[in-house]
Image (cartoon, rainbow, N blue to C red):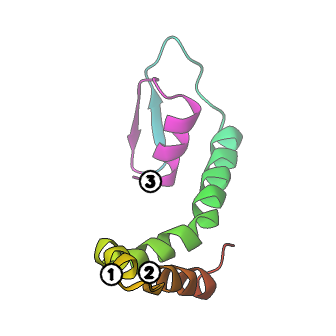
Amino acid sequence: MTDKVAALQALTPSAQWVLRGDSDLEWLDTEQDQPTDSAIQAKIIELQSQYDAQSYARSRKVEYDKLNQDEMRYDDLVNSTTTWQDAIAAIKTSIPKG
């Protein structure tokens, strides 16, 4: 999905339009006004900022997925250890929130 498509969907979720390439927008909706180019560009910047702000979460998820967390929690319960908590804490330390 292009940035412009995402911006148009966010600005006018149920509008009907066709985008050819990245710049040829044909507005088909009769209920909603077509957003201005500046409104679309502002929304693109806003959406990119939101995406960038979640970079740490995407990176952490990759590391969390590498863990066998259910087995780690079970083993911790049986062995009275904190292996799972330590692994999670290590990931959060190595990939801090923005």
Determine the secondary structure under disc 2: helix
Q: Which residues are magenta?
A: 1-21
Q: Position of residue 5 (x, y in %)?
A: 46, 44
Image quadrant assignment for residue 7: top right
Determine the secondary structure under disc 3: loop
| Residue 77 is one of the magenta-drawn residues | no
Which residue, given by chain and number where applicable, does mark 3 sit on? 2
Q: Position of residue 72 (x, y in %)?
A: 35, 80
Determine the secondary structure under disc 1: helix
Of callouts 1 and 2, which one flags the residue occurring earlier in the amino acid sequence?
1
Which residue, given by chain and number where applicable, does mark 1 sit on? 75
Nearest to the observer: residue 79 or residue 16 = 79
> In this picture, is 15 found above or below 37?
above
Contact (Cβ within 8 Å) of mark 1 with mark 2: yes
Whole-angstrom CA distance, mark 1 to mark 3, is: 45 Å
Q: Position of residue 35 (x, y in %)?
A: 62, 31
Number of the front mark, 1 or 2: 1
> In this picture, is 97 found above or below 36?
below
| Disc 2: CA contacts within 10 A as few (<14), some (14-19) or many (>=20) | many
Whole-angstrom CA distance, mark 1 to mark 2, is: 9 Å
Contact (Cβ within 8 Å) of mark 2 with mark 3: no
Q: Residue drawn 38% across and 76% down?
A: 77
Q: Residue drawn 48% across and 69% down?
A: 58
Which residue, given by chain and number where applicable, does mark 2 sit on? 84
